[in-house]
Image (spheres, coloured by chain):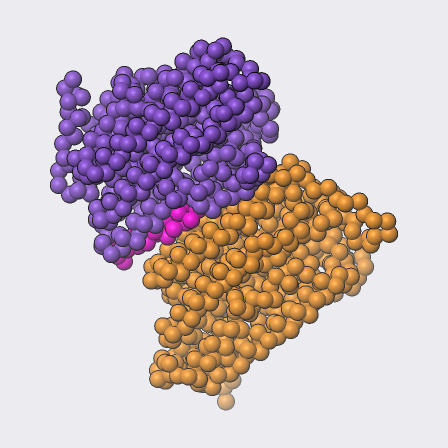
Amino acid sequence: MNFEAPSIDYAGIAPIIALTVGICVVLIGGTFKSLRRAVPGLTLLTLAATAGLLIWQWGESKDLVAGALRLDDLAISISLIAILTAAFAVLLSLREPAAEEAGPGEYHTLLLGSVLGMVLLAQAYNLVTFFVALEALSIPLYILCATNLRREGSLESGLKYLIVGSVGSATLLYGMAFLYGATGSTGFEGIAVGIAHGGLIGDPLVMVGIAMAAVGLAFKTSIAPFHQWTPDVYQGAPSPITSFMAVATKAAAFAVFIRFFDVALIPEASDWQPALAVLAAISIVVGNVGALGQDSLKRLLGYSGIAQAGYMLGGIVVASEAGISSLVFYLAAYAFMNLAAFAVIVARERETVFGDDIRAVRGLGAERPQLAWPLTIAMLALAGLPATAGFIGKLYLIEALVEGDYTWLAVFIAIGTMISVAYYLRVVAAMWMSQEEQAVPAIAGASPEADPVDPEAGRRWYLVGPAVFAAAATVFFGVIPQPLVEFASRAGSALF
Amino acid sequence: MINVLLWLPLAVGIVGLFLPKRATGWWATLGAVATLGVAIGMVASFDSNSAGLQHTVDIAWISGLGVDYSLGIDGLNLFLVVLTAVIWVGGIAFAAIREQERPQLFFFLMLVAETATLGAFLAQDLLLFVLFFDLMLVPFYFLFGAWGHDRSGEGGLTAPAATLKMIVYTLIGSLLMLVAAIATAIISADGGHLTFSIQALQEQGLGLGSERWIFWFFAAAFLVKMPAFLLHGWMPDAYRAAPLPALIVFSGVLAKVGAYGFLRVVLPVFPEATVEFQEVILVVALASILYGSVMAFTQTNVRLIAGYSSVAQLGFITAGIFALRADGADGAILQMVNHGLVVAPIFLIVALLVERTGSEDIREMGGLAMRAPVLAALFLIVALATLAMPGSANFIGEFYILNGLFQEKVVFAVIAISGVAMSAYYALRLYQATMHNRKADGIASREIGLRDGLVLAPLVLCIVGLALYPQLILHRTDASVKQTVTSVTGGPAPQAQLARTEEER
């Protein structure tokens, strides 16, 4: 009897191996007191190694692990966005009270664990890896949200995220069961074949499955009306983690959203397209209206994230190569814009007593231009004004939508953007058009929390550097978008 | 050279950020003058017989999306570019004479605004045009908001609030325009090669069904920008909040971008919808003329008098364009330049008046001519030009417009003529109330300073120069205008009667 060992494509799974090894090293390193200071460095090293291996695989298109994973340019580009975000989060976490309290080893291990989930999720090609990766991504985040042990808000945020996230996962899993039951396959391509050739188009079982899967994914990507957790969780979580969640989670969840809908469910496209379009429109309205009048910058970005998710969902709705490319472009641009904003928020949180309240950035233009410029650019870019990557992103998305005969959704994006200007510019106005807020003298015996953690945070390289870098990238890709357009169009052509 | 023209202001502005505070104003002035020099060079090398684009640049910018970096000059935009350069010199020099807060940033933003405006005029790619059109807003948001005046004590808005109102209003139009521009390209490409080149879009054409809604998306953007009647809600608050140097360039040039957009984009690319909605737009234009005029002679705030008079003038210009005749459009372009050259000095003079009286209310002004004959004389020239005194270029511009309108739509022309009469009233009212009458208490009647005079006098000289030789503009715009109008009307353009007699003379 001949026995053939399964061939394993080590090159393909090298990024996953590197991350896993990194997780072990960081976890063990964190237990030694002498190595504790090196933990952020080791984390960054792991991320760099993974990114390097991913870039090495750029242009490949292959099935891994018996078709459970698919490594292509879409997976690689989304993974790179997630890794970049994680690297930012590591820098922003330096001297973060949450990281100190939870223990740097554990904190960074969890962060890397979540990144591993994202890298897997971006490659997921059957229902099992899809679900496992999604949980690998989520569970570390539930804990990370609650790492600021002394703040009630942080614990509440973790618990809320856990409950809502679990509901989302459960719904998704239920939906998957329906799809498996209908098509008899767990592989994405198998599901597509099952639907197309099994006479299942319009089958109620499949439709219920699709609906539940869409709801589950909408929870993860904070699409309205499944968004209620977003502002609370964003506000309560430690800010570096919020930045990570806002960008990387969204990127990874959208990656699988794309793969699941545009590969596995593509035969049913004409049924789910209008439904997703309506969800996108609701998100745009709810997010943009909700963000008006928010005083907490993190809540504001939470609502803005809901609206932006609505814009991005448009890329999936049209189910075309242009749609996916524009979505990936928008995700990359979104990463830069949000990271610049969050870096500034983290700096001001430590520098002032106002936390993430909008008062913290009043008069910033005169006081700390090195922070005011990045935040200004981030806000203008999120509002989609020209000469930023945000404008090109909107242009790309609208082009895909009009091409896909969803002009009405494009008009919705335009209207949503118009509303959004009101709250984004409010932040800009606070920075440049009002005086610095004078802190009310602390009442004697007030809690030590009221004192700024680090009055010089606005000059720290690890906060100013990322902010300036991300803002510069936002402007650069707004003026010379061609490299990023090519990056995104490679991702789009991986599927179609 | 066209690249230099476009990017020079921005480059100067960036360098200015790193100069010492005292030097930035003069450095920025120098940059604006240099830009003007390049613009004049463009006029000198312009071939007035050609209707096509000159000095073109065309490079693929985002090839995946079909967007090109494409610039060019023809009769439609040549003098608007010159106007931009002239007015910016005035605005920046005026600001440089005075002390500004955070001057590096102020002049940087002024110069960014100049690049954006020039970009909107020069762009020959529809998307590039939209991009620059939107970009113009950003520097003005900061200029109005951070250097503006708080009017919340006078029943108005704070500067940031007034500015936000302006931004939201204008973005309504320009975001819809973005969607419309993309739709235009995609529909006209019809699955083929996607391009945003205005010329290519003009040749490919759209169906009337798509043209209809796209026309209104574009019209919304341009009418808000002007502003036209019913879409002018942002104007009073923004004009009251704005710092005067920024307002000089804003009202002098930015309003014209809207009117220019009709000529550059709407007429050639959506000809059928243009004909279909000609009368609707004409009604809006006439409403703007009447409403703007009436408001201009009831307001007492000098800024608002000038602001509402602009509404009326832009109504004239729109009417000229939508006469859909070569003489009307010729007159519209001439009148855009005229109006820019008139309204900028008015705001300069307003600034001087405010410095002398400490008030912006004409009821608290008066008698300034007593000790300031030179200022009064300059103001008189400007005021007479505003009311389109025969002999001024404004007279010729309005005459062309009315002539075009008269041959096409008599009723509209008759109503529009009343606007001419009303303009005499508000221009003279403004002049008399401030310069004549009895001198109010607490007013220092001072002669115009030498440096202010050096800013104001050249602008007035431009008005006089154009009055003497309007062919400078008409001669060069005619070929392109005929081509544009022909693209709408189909057949050969009706011969511009007046243009011929002018040339014979």
Residue A491, position in %: x, y? 44, 60
Q: Could one spot residue A33 in this view of the protein?
A: yes
Q: Residue at x 47, y 53 (%)?
A: A417
Residue A243, position in %: x, y? 62, 57
Q: Residue at x 38, y 74 (%)?
A: A271
Q: Residue furthest front?
A: B438
**Of B309 and A451, which appears nearest the observer?**
B309
Q: Is residue B440 above or below residue A250?
A: above
**Of B399 and A345, which appears nearest the observer?**
B399
Secondary structure mainly formed by the magenta segment: helix
**Of A396 and A8, which appears nearest the observer?**
A396
What colour do you see for chain A? orange
Magenta stretch: give its range. B171-195
* Letter of the chain shown purple in the rendering: B
Residue B419, position in %: x, y? 30, 32
Residue A391, position in %: x, y? 45, 49
